[in-house]
Image (cartoon, rainbow, N blue to C red):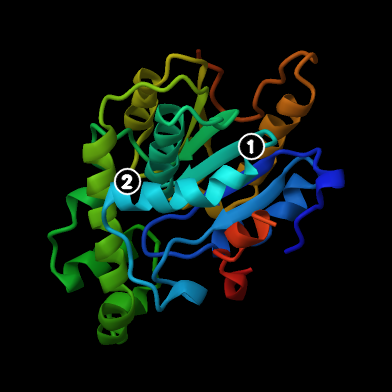
Amino acid sequence: MRLRTSSEMAAPWLFCFHHAGAGVSSFARWQRDLGDAAEVVPVLLPGRGPRAREARITDAAELMGELRELIKPLLDRPYLLYGHSLGGLVAHALTLALEEDGLHPPARLVVGAVPPPHLRNLLLRSSRLSDQELLELLVDLDAVPAEAAGRDAALWQRMVVPALRDDLRLGESLCLAAAGTRLRTPLFALAGRDDPVSPLADVAQWADYTEAEFRLQTLPGGHFFVRERSVPRLLRQVAEELRAPRRARRTFQGESSDRQDAATTLVATVDRSER
């Protein structure tokens, strides 16, 4: 991935945060759909991909400390945050931390497939399941292939479940740290029409987490609708609004209506093996 030089910096950044137990593969083709509307920067958390030798972070305050240091040098231009599932809690907590520090917050915070911190989605409530039960749940959610809870269960329990459990602990810490706190940043929430983990009624409660504009949007798909092209295409619309603020605001094309050399360091967190 090539970041633009200062002379080219017209488009906002789009920092993307991945779901639990994952890397950044979901964002691998997003730049194609965003075009020149935004510069896509998938942020890889420690303990996976090229960062596999780093200790995974399970404490919200520790993670916010790392992310603030990574993002501060890039706050000289507008930017968006998108987080999916666990990544939505990360993006929300980062926005809150930046506001509290008096730093330039994102122009928009967009969260997908996650209820607000005062709620706990199905995965967070399942953190005490046995390894086998957790894998069976992931199979039911179409998050992993059926073999993960069958003939390949031992491999998945050894290679995947430990990271997933740490991410679920991080999710709990993020929820405890940010429950009920209202932002001054516009917040857009996305829900999958058929998502059994984060249903629309739960996602809608993000409305209580901002004093600014709130939008709620449904998209086709289940919990992992982030894998579909509808998300980057929608985010392109959001980014284009930032670049043309005097133009009439465009309605999201979906199923719901509106409601109220530092850069190189950050991109070092991108899992290039998944791009």
Q: Is residue 59 left or right of residue 107?
A: left
Q: Is residue 12 above or below residue 85?
A: above
Residue nearest the viewer, comparing 58 with 104: 104
Residue tagged 2: 197
Q: Is residue 169 above or below residue 104?
A: below
How many numbered marks appear? 2
Indicate the amino acid at tag 2.
Val
Q: Is residue 164 left or right of residue 33?
A: left
Q: Say if mark 1 contacts mark 2, CB within 8 Å.
A: no
Indicate the amino acid at tag 1.
Tyr
**Which residue does the image show at 33% across and 70% down from the upper left?**
55
Q: Does residue 52 appear anywhere in the picture? A: yes
Residue tagged 1: 79
Quick one: label 1, few (<14), some, or many (20+) residues within 10 Å? Answer: many
> Where residue 15 sits: x, y (%)?
58, 47
Q: Is residue 117 above or below residue 61?
A: above
Q: Earlier in the sequence, mark 1 or mark 2?
A: 1
Q: Does residue 86 appear anywhere in the picture? A: no
Residue extending furthest toward the right: 7
- Callout in the foreground (1, 2): 1
